[in-house]
Amino acid sequence: LRIELQRRRVHRAPATRGVREGSVPWLVLLLDSWETFRHSYDDLRHGALLSELSSVLRDGSGLGLRAFVSGDRSLLASPIVTLFGTRLILPMADADSYGLAGIARRDVPQQFIPGRAILPSTPVTTMQFAQLDPDPAPSAQRAALNRLRTQLRRRWPQTTTGAMPVRALPRLVTPDMLKPATRQWRLPIGLGGDSTETLELDLSETTTALIA
């Protein structure tokens, strides 16, 4: 994302006009479960990835980036929440938690039905989320999403760039899962990267290695 935003900044048409006129396609960032993301990467390089995400969200709005982030009450308590102009608040277990979103306790509905949310505004607005399919089952919603994806691909066949794959790392890596060394003095040591490729240690350039 950072590389793409930098490319757009260099080759910049007026950003907001370009998005409306179609010269700058939207980048859509979906981040589900902020608390899991933060727990996984908060200690990585002293929180550098979280800072990078904040920077991307802050700089990307004028370059066609549209971000949607879901999370629990910890998201509302995080400094990153100030970067979101629209907040949709789903039911919370603790009524006092609505105060984190700027919603007074008296404005919280007494009863919630599935799909109901609150928009912190003046006055507070209550809304009902739309469903892709009348059947609320997750399998039906996924099927409807796949149908929509097929329709969009037929409508815009020239759009070939897909989402960047990020595959989960296995808990156990055995030698048969590794590809052979690409050249002499390269030692396959494991799997890594976004596409879980075989990583190698170049023994011709590395005389020492630290595993901490």
Image: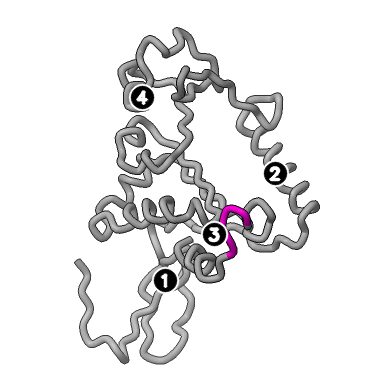
In the displayed structure image, the side of residue 53 where residue 154 appears, left or right? right
Q: For mark 2, give the secondary structure.
A: helix
- Tell me whether the residue at label 3 lies in contact with that at label 1, contact meaning CB atoms closer than 8 angstroms: no
Per the image, the residue denoted by label 2 is 146
Mark seen at residue 175: 1
> Of helix, strand and loop, which mostly describes the magenta segment?
helix
Which amino acid lies under the numbered mark 1 shown in the image of this protein? Answer: Pro
Q: Are marks 4 and 2 in contact (CB under 8 Å)?
A: no
Q: Which mark is residue 165?
A: 3
Element carrying mark 1:
helix
Q: Secondary structure at mark 3?
A: loop
Amino acid on which the number 4 mark rests in the picture: Gly
Cα gap from disc 4 to disc 2, whole angstroms: 36 Å
Q: Residue at x 33, y 49 (%)?
A: 40
User: Label 2: few (<14), some or many (≥20) within 10 Å?
Assistant: few
Q: Where is residue 47? Give x, y as percent.
A: 27, 54
Occupied quadrant, residue 135: top right
